């Protein structure tokens, strides 16, 4: 049937791509808020991890002490993350991608299996679900193994892979929300600053990584969320697999030797300590790399810059589709967003949920706005940009504004 | 319509043609036989590539992984739905579906027996098997 299709406008294609990346981010945040609000009664848990090696917060300390302690913790964490990223760059430089992939797979298995198991156990205990241990083990094993296969085999159903990536992000983010309060906020700000530095400074590890990947024109095998490509009906060629990357590299550090002494001996923790941080491989296009660390100690996630890159090696632009639409070629490839972005956005919102739901709404809107601004900047500057800073800055700002204005206005009303 | 459909089906089974992104018959005809064996359509695998994947998923499912069988059926749903397409892939997907249903029936019956039977049926072993007690005993949730 001859039918002239209305050519898709820029707003349609761009909007659809943005929606396809906003939806999983929102789902991840929603799930973390859900987890936090259901399991929040166990707030007495204090997690010993790499993010608290310098200082453990207690409620009896003064504000200044808490702030200093949190600052020390964050600096330690950022230092670990930096070292991890440099090691990752080294591995990538020496082309040990197989090792990195296996490491990443193992880490994902540990995150899905052990952390997923822990959270499932929390649920079981809270609601007294009469499930027996054999069934539980079988189900958990299935879940974890299929998850690892979905994330690392390049061709499994797209929705299964995307679902598992969101779940991994949710699990790690929930773990991070168990950190003490001041440490969490200072850590978020510190990581945003680190991201800014690592991506924009010429000596930054993430920038080195991207340049290496670009020079070799390799793909980064990383834990990256890839949105389904938007296909335009008027394209003559089929779906073009583009390498558009939005890099967010999360590096987790393998520091089991350093950390084992700091970790409480515990079944899970022991296993955690032997699991190393997963390093997402970055192959070629600098995509977001999420390296899942063994939560407690190892999550050193770096945010990689946002980069859009085209397959032909040039620095592409998010709005590639603009140019290609003009030429009548196939439309955009997939947008990729690193899992670290998911995680830290969700951590922010999860922390906000621990206070009140008003802060959750405010922070969610702030983060989405930040993500939109970052995408626009990306289209404007057409080079690697960090994705964390804008969103985290807006999110933190809105959290504190909402929290203190809410208190003030409540007192005034009452 | 019938002529075009059968034409489409013969085209599909004789020329899977994975190198063409848009095989000539799929754009114009509302064909009932799929060209792409996966639910992802053109973003997924072609028929040749999917043979090794179906086989691998099927074999790995025997390692106590019924969920993998379920994912296999889900991923290759067009193969299941259209009973005369993809003759090489179909046996594996059907076997995965049967395996998953058998396993889930067994598992569900066990779970229901365990949950509903409780202590009356099992006696003291119920307390030993139930998960929250096991977790307490092994200190699994005392993590920090």
Image (tube, rainbow, N blue to C red):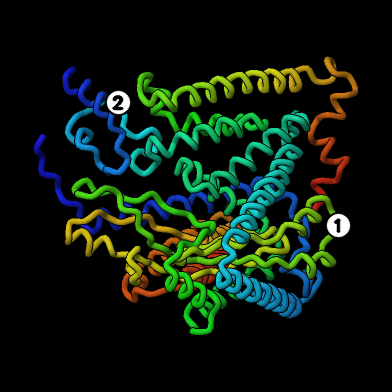
Closer to the camera in the image, A106 or B10? B10
Residue B67 lies in quadrant: top right
Say the numbered circle drawn on residue B33: 2
Identity of the residue furthest to the front in this view: B14
Cα distance between the residues tagged 2 and 1: 58 Å
Residue at x 33%, y 71% (from the top left corner): A314
Tag 1 residue: A265
Q: Which quadrant would the C terminus of chain A be assigned to in this image?
A: bottom right
Q: Which quadrant would the N terminus of chain A be assigned to in this image?
A: top left
Horizontal side of residue B13 vs A161, given as left or right: left
Horizontal side of residue A406 vs B84, given as left or right: right
Horizontal side of residue A291 vs B47, given as left or right: right
Can residue A355 be seen in this snapshot? no
Residue at x 68%, y 78% (from the top left corner): A75
Location of residue A42 in the rendering, given as x and y in whole percent from the top left corner: 75, 50
Relative vertical location of residue B33 with respect to residue A356 in this rendering, above or below: above
Say the numbered circle drawn on residue A124: none
The answer to whether dots 2 and 1 both sit on one chain is no
Q: Residues within 10 Å of mark 2 (few under 14, many from 20)?
A: many
Horizontal side of residue A370 vs A28, given as left or right: left
């Amino acid at each position: 049937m001859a039918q002239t299709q209305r050519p898709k406008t820029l707003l349609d294609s761009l909007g659809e791509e943005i929606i396809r990346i906003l939806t999983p981010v929102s789902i991840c945040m929603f799930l973390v808020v859900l987890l936090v609000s259901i399991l929040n009664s166990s707030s007495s848990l204090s997690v010993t991890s790499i993010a608290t090696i310098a200082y453990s917060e207690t409620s009896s300390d003064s504000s200044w002490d808490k702030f200093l302690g949190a600052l020390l913790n964050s600096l330690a964490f950022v230092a670990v993350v930096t070292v991890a990223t440099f090691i990752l760059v080294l591995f990538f430089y020496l082309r040990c991608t197989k090792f990195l992939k296996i490491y990443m797979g193992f880490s994902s298995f540990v995150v899905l299996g052990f952390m997923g198991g822990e959270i499932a156990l929390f649920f079981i205990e809270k609601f007294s679900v009469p499930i027996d241990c054999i069934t539980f083990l079988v189900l958990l094993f299935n879940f974890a193994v299929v998850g690892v296969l979905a994330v690392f085999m390049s061709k499994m159903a797209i929705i299964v892979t995307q679902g598992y990536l969101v779940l991994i992000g949710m699990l790690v983010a929930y773990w991070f929300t168990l950190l003490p309060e001041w440490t969490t906020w200072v850590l978020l700000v510190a990581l945003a600053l680190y991201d800014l530095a690592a991506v924009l400074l010429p000596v930054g590890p993430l920038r080195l990584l991207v340049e290496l990947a670009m020079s070799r024109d390799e793909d980064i095998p990383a834990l990256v969320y890839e949105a389904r490509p938007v296909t335009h009906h008027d394209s003559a060629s089929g779906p073009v697999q583009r390498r558009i990357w939005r890099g967010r590299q999360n590096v987790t550090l393998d520091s089991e030797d350093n950390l084992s002494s700091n970790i409480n001996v515990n079944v899970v923790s022991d296993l955690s300590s032997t699991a190393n941080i997963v390093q997402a491989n970055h192959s070629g296009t600098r995509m977001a790399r999420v390296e899942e660390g063994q939560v407690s100690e190892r999550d050193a996630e770096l945010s990689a810059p946002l980069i859009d890159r085209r397959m032909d090696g040039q620095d592409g632009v998010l709005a590639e589709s603009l140019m290609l639409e003009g030429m009548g070629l196939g439309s955009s490839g997939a947008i990729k967003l690193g899992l670290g972005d998911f995680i830290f956005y969700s951590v922010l919102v999860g922390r906000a949920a621990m206070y009140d739901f008003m802060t959750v709404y405010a922070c969610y809107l702030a983060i989405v706005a930040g993500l939109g601004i970052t995408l626009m900047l990306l289209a404007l500057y057409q080079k690697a940009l960090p994705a964390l800073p804008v969103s985290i800055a807006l999110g933190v700002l809105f959290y504190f504004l909402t929290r203190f204005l809410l208190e003030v206005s409540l007192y005034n009303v009452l | 319509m019938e002529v075009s459909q059968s034409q489409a089906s013969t085209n599909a089974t004789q020329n899977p043609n994975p190198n063409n992104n848009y095989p000539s018959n799929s754009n114009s005809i509302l064909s009932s036989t799929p060209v792409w064996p996966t639910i992802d359509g053109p973003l997924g695998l072609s028929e040749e590539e999917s043979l090794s994947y179906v086989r691998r998923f099927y074999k790995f499912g025997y390692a106590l992984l019924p969920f993998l069988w379920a994912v296999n059926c889900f991923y290759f749903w067009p193969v299941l739905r259209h009973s005369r397409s993809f003759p090489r892939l179909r046996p594996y997907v059907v076997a995965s579906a049967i395996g998953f249903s058998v396993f889930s029936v067994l598992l569900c019956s066990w779970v229901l027996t365990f949950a509903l039977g409780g202590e009356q049926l099992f006696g003291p072993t119920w307390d030993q098997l139930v998960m929250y007690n096991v977790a307490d005993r092994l200190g699994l949730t005392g993590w920090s």
